[in-house]
Amino acid sequence: MSDMTALLNDLSYIPPNNEHNKPTQGDIGKTSTEPTQATRNEFEELYASANEELYPGCDYVTRLDFMAKFTYFKVKGYESIHACEHDCCLFRGDDNKDLDFCPVCNTSRWKDSNTPGKKVPKKVLRYFPIIPRLQRLYKSSHTAKEMIWHATGKCTEPGKMQHPVDGRAWKKFDNKYPDFAKEPRNVRLRLAADGFNTFGNLSQAYSM
């Protein structure tokens, strides 16, 4: 059994229906966690991929193995940064990278500071640099085409907004920064925040 097949077995395990896991009175009315037929079909497809050769005659890697490794390389390139468990600071830079305690709340950086060998941090921030991710969007002819859709596929129906390019904010930006706007491959970024209390009112959350 391959490692990938063993992983699928763990993910698709269904506990036997016996006296130890029969629903109790408190469970009645709760949403069932029993896998649906659609979920079963997905696992069957994964099992098939785990036993399918990547190409005829390839006996050392399966189709699922290749896709798993390919996905890993797509998300590769992040930086792990230790953080205070109370989100006070990041242990990075010349001032903080070698500290064992948070300079704000004095909380230990490590789960167990007395552990011999390599210590385990309490919290880790995984930072994905944005520039390499944007560059990858232009490495594929398919995604590169979609990245300039705002310049090649504008909506032609009057009064209809199909893309932010049809809105007043986009047009105002173009008028303010004409040199940036004339190159359709330039990327425009929008800042979004979920649950952000703009006016300090804790009873009301906003999405911006």
Image (tube, rainbow, N blue to C red):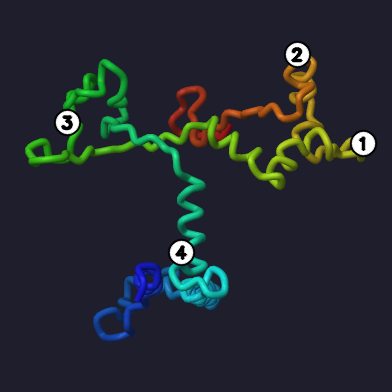
Q: Which residue is mark 3?
A: 108
Q: Is residue 92 visible?
A: yes
Circles 1 and 4, Cβ within 8 Å, touching? The answer is no
Q: CA distance from mark 4 to mark 2?
A: 49 Å
Q: Name the mark on residue 176.
A: 2
SS class, disc 1: loop
Q: Earlier in the sequence, mark 2 or mark 1?
A: 1
Identified at 77% across, 39% down, the residue is 149
Q: Rounded to the nearest whole Å, what is the CA distance between mark 4 and mark 3? A: 40 Å
Q: Amino acid at mark 3?
A: Ser
Give me the C-alpha separation between circle 2 and circle 1: 24 Å
Instruction: Please determine whether, in this image, residue 115 is positioned above or below residue 56.
Output: above
Is disc 3 in contact with disc 2, using a CB cutoff of under 8 Å?
no
The quadrant the N terminus occupies is: bottom left
> Disc 1 marks which residue?
158
Q: Count the marks: how many?
A: 4
Task: Using the image, tell me which numbered label, if any, was put on residue 65.
Answer: 4
